[in-house]
Amino acid sequence: MKFRIVPSTLDGRRQLLTSYLINDSLAIDAGSLAIGLTPEEQLKIRSIVITHAHLDHVISLPLMVTDLFEELREPIKLYATPSDFEAIQHHLLTPRVWIPLETMKNAHTELIAYHPIRTAESFVAEDLKITPIAVTHTILTHGLLVEDDHSALLFTSDTGATHQIWQVAQECDKLRAVFIDLSFPNRLTDLARVSCHHSPATLIEELPKIKPGVPVYAVHLKAMYHHQVAAEIAELNQPRIQIAEVGREYEF
């Protein structure tokens, strides 16, 4: 399984917005798809799974589908909870902000085909089994267990201390990596807790819950604090925790 964090800053090395690309055709979240990918790369995306409807996870969705307006021959499949889809419809794809969803069609197809998802109900997208697992955030948010025949990756999405997703991970024999939220430096741990994110201090508290021997990749580092958070992770002297490199293609 191939994995890449889509860039969203000028230097291409940090995350300001959130999108992950798996096997070129599946995107997790749509924060940076229209910013960090070429038009050719965007055209390869056939399915997008939304973990929650916060702005940094959905903002480039309307940009992407309108950029690809003439090229699409079949709709992009959008997987999201009913509440997230409603938020996207009423607050993002609305006449006051952008082009309404119901008018997004070209001569060949509608641009987006909506597929509802629900907590703990697995579904298949791009030949991958995906299981949404509720995590601890300020709104309903789902981490995702993504599986092919040989491997599995776990994405926590935005979360603070949580439990259910680690129980699911313990039962997955082919789990190869965990990608976990790490947003703030230790001096902002109080903010991390109240906003349901992690700092290095809270991540180390969470580590005993994570399946032993599985590498842990920190993602979602706030761009302003990237270097400070990376230094604090290094100070933990925990070889299994590393900062995921934006733009690098990983193979699992």
Image (cartoon, grey):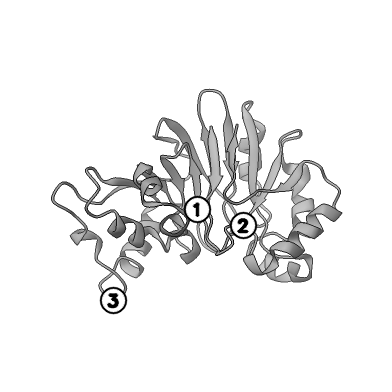
The residue mark sitting in front, 3 or 2, is 2
In the picture of the structure, the residue carrying the numbered disc 1 is 19
In the picture of the structure, the residue carrying the numbered disc 3 is 96
Residue 229 - label: none
Left or right, 188 with respect to 15, comes to right
Image quadrant where residue 125 sits? top left
Instruction: Give above or below for 241 relative to 15.
Output: above
3 and 2 marks in contact (CB < 8 Å) = no
* Observer-nearest of 77 and 225: 225
The residue mark sitting in front, 3 or 1, is 1
Left or right, 162 with respect to 24, comes to right
Q: Position of residue 231 (x, y in %)?
A: 80, 59
Distance between the alpha carbons at the discs numbered 2 and 1: 13 Å
* Observer-nearest of 32 and 88: 32
Label 2: how many residues lie within 10 Å, few (<14), some (14-19) or many (20+)?
Answer: some
Q: Residue furthest top?
A: 149
